[in-house]
Structures are given as C-alpha cells and as structure tokens.
Image (spheres, grey):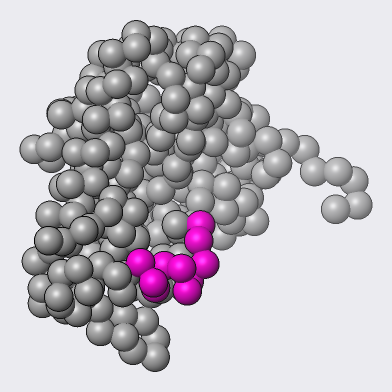
Amino acid sequence: MMNLTLKQLRYFEAVAKQGHFGRAAAVCSISQPALSVQIRDMEESLGVTLFERGPRGVTLTGFAETLAPRVRAILREVDELGELARAARGDLSGRLRLGVIPTIAPYLLPRLITAITRRFADVDLHVRESQTQRLVEELVEGQIDAALVALPVEHPALTSLELFSETLVFVRPGSEAAKPAPARSELQNMRLLLLEEGHCFRDQALSFCGLPKTQPRDGLDGSSLSTLVQMVGSGIGVTMIPEMAIDVETKSAPVAVARFSDTEPVRRIGMLWRRTSPLHDHLSELAEMTKDLALAQQDDLREAATTLHEPPQRSKGI
C-alpha cells in the first residue's frame, strides 16, 4: 500500500515547478538533502522515477507529467479545507495572500495594508507583486487568495469584480510644459517609452496609441513606471502613467503632466479570486473596502491639484 504524505506532495510540486532541487528546497525552507530524501521515498512508494537529474536541473518523467496536475489539485483542495475552516470562524483571520500588479502596488498598497490590518486584526497579510499572467496562474494553483489587476481578465476558474477606473495621463519633459497637450494620433510620431513586455499596462498604452503590440522597438522599454518617468525627465522621450502614480512618480523628476486633448485613456481595476474559494464573502468585503479606498484616494489627488503636477525645480548647480 502506498504511503504518500502531504509533505511529499508539496515537495514534489516545488521541484516540478522550480526544475531544480536546490531552488525547490529554498522555496520549502528545508535543506536540499532533506528534500531529496522525501522525493526518493515518494518514488519508492510509487515504484517509479519522478525526475530525471541533470547537471543544470531536473526534468519530469512522463509519469510525473501526468501526476503533476493531480498533485496540484489535491493540494488546492487541502488548502481550501483550511479556508473553509477560516470562513466558518466568522471574521477573516489567519494568512491572507494578496497579489498585486506593479502598476498598482506602490500607489494603493500603503493605504490598503493599513485598512486591512485595522479591519481584520487577526489577519497575517502576505503581499505578492507580479505581472498579471503570473498572478492568474498562482490564483488558479491556490498559491494566493486574491489579486488586484487591470481588467479584463477572463478565466473560467476565477471570479472577477470591477472596483474602479482611472485615467492615464501624459508625461513629458518639464521644458515642454507650455506646449499643448497632444492628441492620441500624435503619439505615434513621438518617442514613447513603455514598460517591458509582459506588463498589461504596456498593452493598454499601445492600444490607446493605435500601435501594434508586435511592432519592433528600439530599446525604449523600462522595468517600472519610476524608470520611465526618470527617463522622460532626462529628455529621452515621453510616456504615460496611471493617475494614481502621479504624486509618487513625478516628485523627483523634472517632468510635466497633462491630460490628453481628445479621448482620455482609461484602465479598469478589479479583484480576482477563485470561484470555489470558501473565503468568497470575506474577499467580496475586501474588494468593496479596496474600492472605497481607491475612490477616496482619487478624490484626494484631484483636490490637492487644481492643475496637474508641475515639474519640480532643479537645485542650483545641478
């Protein structure tokens, strides 16, 4: 009779995902020899080899490829048992794993984290910042509980709830502040700086400009909105950022911000979670709380600036 343990299944999943025993051991917070022993015991119980060892890592055997999705499903069901118990206790408590995309995290999280810890005193909040595709994968696999992303995101296993929308604004060097705001059609002739591939914000900007996603670019991509704004301040080009990022990103760069002269680009922000999650009611409450915070933040930003952000003055001698 096979004697598999949940620990072995979690270690198997870690190795399958990482493709390397050392990295899997680090993820599981155990030593590599201890993990190897557990995998070997699992192989002996099953009577088959699970991984082909190589000098640069491991690959799954044919049997392990078949086994992997079933192991993920088992672990997901086990995790949801814990969520079911948490939901039954009433108020949200215990570990809450929240994913956030990089174009939201620095601007909304400070207020949101404070609100969550005040509202749910017994929550152990874990925040994961990553791109949308990765967050969706982690949600489906049960590695996070919910995610804040730009919509639309369609997946049959996930619930999607729109929270709010915000405009995208135009950022250019401060020396060009007096120029008229551009129309959308003019962006195609400008040196437009964008986030690197994989960011949904990049796709939204390209779509607004009427540019194809596959069009070759000449190295004008950045890894963060901060990088893009600093590049604009150096006179390299122009960019777009979400309204929530204005106050944070433009304080330390000599840039000017303007709204577009015709149609304004808008992005929709929502929260995702698994349809089967026992925490559905709690996550719905969290979504509403996030919505209220975001809308209040928008009101504060607009009230604080009767005009959009003025470029900061350079210090003398710089």
Give the residue drawn at x 15%, y 77%: 48
Q: Residue furthest right?
A: 317
Q: Position of residue 182 (x, y in %)?
A: 40, 39
Please tell me whether residue 193 is drawn above or below residue 129 in the rendered image: below
Q: Position of residue 175 (x, y in %)?
A: 65, 45
Viewer-side residue, 101 vs 165 = 101
- Name the side, left or right, on which 131 lies relative to 296: left
Please tell me whether residue 125 is drawn above or below residue 211 in the rendered image: above
On the image, which quarter does residue 255 sit in? top right
Q: Position of residue 15 (x, y in %)?
A: 33, 67
Viewer-side residue, 130 vs 157 = 157
- Name the side, left or right, on which 175 lies relative to 198: right
Give the residue drawn at x 46%, y 68%: 34
Q: Residue furthest front?
A: 1
Which quadrant is home to the N terminus?
bottom left
The answer to whether residue 218 is visible is no
Viewer-side residue, 43 vs 173 = 43
Viewer-side residue, 40 vs 22 = 40
Which stretch appears magenta? 29-38
On the image, which quarter does residue 261 sit in? top left
Please tell me whether residue 244 is drawn above or below residue 24 in the rendered image: above
- Name the side, left or right, on which 236 lies relative to 239: right
Q: Main secondary structure of the magenta part?
A: helix
Q: Residue furthest bottom?
A: 55
Give the residue drawn at x 72%, y 36%: 312
On the image, which quarter does residue 311 sit in? top right
Is residue 236 rendered magenta in the image? Answer: no
The answer to whether residue 109 is visible is yes
Please tell me whether residue 110 is drawn above or below residue 30 in the rendered image: above
**Callout count:** 0
Q: Position of residue 187 (x, y in %)?
A: 36, 49
Give the residue drawn at x 20%, y 32%: 274
